[in-house]
Amino acid sequence: MSGHNLSSIPLGSTIRKLGTIACVIGSLGVTFMMLLTVVGVFWRYVLNDALFGLQDVSVLTASVVVACAIFYGGIYGAHVTIELIERHFGDRVLRIADVLVHALSVGILVVAVRALIKKGRCGFDCGHITVNLGILHQPFYYILAGACALMAVYYSLRFIAALQPVRN
């Protein structure tokens, strides 16, 4: 769509700082997963013994990395786009498309947040635990819900900015 200029929306500097925090946490998570993999491979093939619960920790770390990637990737446009609207239509159509896309994005993210919170509430009673170590998935559902909620706030702010009159 029409770019990801954080300075053009309210709270842009706060969102940029949260994006930096998400980037750092996600990077640490990927590094931790890499170290887990190296240790797991060493333990399995050199010491001929698998580490119990390694997969559980890896999967839960991956969910934190995904949550960080959702937010960071969303605010910095780290996704594939085909900019047909910009190429073939004028600014008016682009503004209408921006408003529609941001409204739809907020709606989808609100549904996702609601579903993740509902799933997280069930917790142990529904058997939402890891296979080996029995770690509850509940906090990880909430982390993903938090990332989606931050994205919903971001797209809401972009929606508001898209509704503002264009200043020349």
Image (cartoon, rainbow, N blue to C red):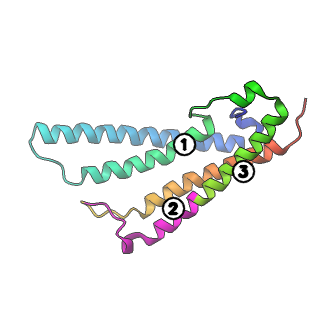
* 120 magenta-colored: yes
Q: In the image, what residue occupies the spot 76% across and 47% down?
A: 159
Sequence-wise, the earlier of marks 3 and 2 is 3
Q: Where in the figure is residue 135, as x and y percent of width and height?
A: 32, 62
Name the residue tied to disc 1.
21
Q: Residue furthest left?
A: 48
On the picture, is 21 further left or further right than 159? left
Task: Point out the image quarter for the N terminus.
Answer: top right
Few, some or many residues within 10 Å of mark 1 (<14, 14–19, 20+): some
Q: Secondary structure at mark 2?
A: helix
Q: Where in the figure is residue 147, as x and y percent of width and height?
A: 55, 51
Query: Residue 116 shows which numbered tag?
Result: 2
User: Could you give the CA–CA distance between mark 2 and mark 1, rounded to whole angstroms?
Assistant: 22 Å
Q: Secondary structure at mark 1?
A: helix
Q: Are marks 1 and 3 in contact (CB under 8 Å)?
A: no
On the picture, is 141 further left or further right than 20? left
Few, some or many residues within 10 Å of mark 3 (<14, 14–19, 20+): some
Q: Is residue 85 above or below residue 28?
A: above
Q: Is residue 83 above or below residue 9?
A: above
Write down the quadrant of residue 80 in the picture. Answer: top right
Sequence-wise, the earlier of marks 2 and 1 is 1
Viewer-side residue, 83 vs 30: 83
Which mark is nearer the camera, 1 or 3? 3
Q: Residue furthest top?
A: 87
